[in-house]
Image (spheres, rainbow, N blue to C red):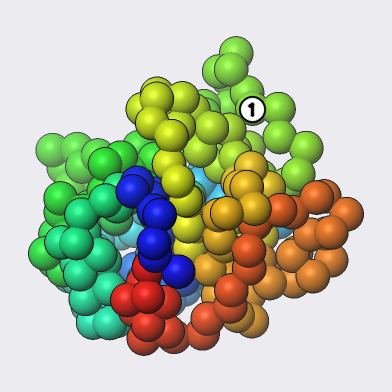
Amino acid sequence: MANSIERQLIVFDFDWSMADQDTDRWIFEVNAPDLRRKMKNLKDEVQWTDLVAQSLREFHTRGGKREQIEEALRIMPFHPAMVRAVQDLKTRGKTSFLCLSNANSVFISTILKSKGLTDLFEEIITNPAEWDLSGLLKVRRRIAPDSPNQHQCKVGCSPNMCKGEELDAFLKRHGVQFDRIIYVGDGSNDFCPILRLRSQDMILCRKFRGLERRIARDGEKEGLKCQVRYWAGAWEVEEIFAQL
């Protein structure tokens, strides 16, 4: 699989792709299961990023602490094989890493720091978040609902961000021709960016989740060109990375 590859880009979704859980849901399952239930009930009525922000405000109002959220993130399932896989690949050179996620900057950076991966990614493209002085985590959409620059995605990205447009913009910003792009994803919102990939590129699709179903249903119809490999556990990603 290696040979003539001089520069490659690994693009990671975060929840259920790099990590073995969903950050938005996990922190409430750990700290406030009733809010987790409320989110499940409201997810078809309220845009997801807005719902997370609303739930964080509610958690804060009832006395929820920053430390509780940070601790939940640190103990969230994250496979040691995934840490090894990315560290080994980075050490070998020739590989750049990009994170493209619908989570938020605080959740991702907190977890990466706890795993010793703070310097892994060239960019983390996600929803912005910051702690205020009272300990409330304020999360907002990457593309605000009142922004004149709404994305034009027709494939099914959520309103806060089109991952395909973001991937294109990253590649344009960096002006680098990558010999190969490998995308690690699991959700149906990872379908749009992988449609931008070429025949020498690859999607490492996690089994049993939305992206697998979307590829099966629409891959051929939408002209998916890249190679597709499936995985279930992080140890399999480590195995694939070792062969790159």
Q: Position of residue 147 (x, y in %)?
A: 55, 18
Count of marks placed on residues: 1
Query: Residue furthest toward the front?
Result: 3
Placement of 85 over or under 183, stated as above or below:
below
Q: Is residue 157 left or right of residue 139?
A: right
Placement of 2 over or under 20, stated as above or below:
above
Residue drawn where x is 64% and y is 42% of the image: 196
Placement of 85 over or under 145, stated as above or below:
below
Q: Nearer the viewer, residue 77 or 28?
A: 77
Q: Is residue 116 left or right of residue 40?
A: left
Quarter of the view holding residue 161:
top right
Q: Position of residue 102 (x, y in %)?
A: 48, 50
Residue drawn where x is 15% and y is 61% of the image: 91
Query: Residue furthest toward the top?
Result: 148
- Give the residue number, with chain letter if any, for mark 1: 151
Residue 58 visible in the current orientation: no
Quarter of the view holding residue 63:
bottom left
Residue 205 visible in the current orientation: yes
Instruction: Report the quarter where the C terminus lies.
Output: bottom left
Q: Nearer the viewer, residue 90 or 188?
A: 90
**Label 1 neighbourhood size at 10 Å, few (<14), some (14-19), many (20+)?**
some
Instruction: Report the quarter where the N terminus lies.
Output: bottom left
Name the kind of residue labelled 1 in the image. Answer: His
Q: Is residue 79 left or right of residue 48?
A: left
Q: Nearer the viewer, residue 112 or 75?
A: 112
Residue drawn where x is 29% and y is 52% of the image: 95
Q: Nearer the viewer, residue 79 or 239?
A: 239
Residue drawn where x is 58% and y is 78% of the image: 230
Query: In what element is the residue under mark 1?
Result: loop
Q: Position of residue 41 (x, y in %)?
A: 64, 66
Q: Position of residue 178 (x, y in %)?
A: 43, 41
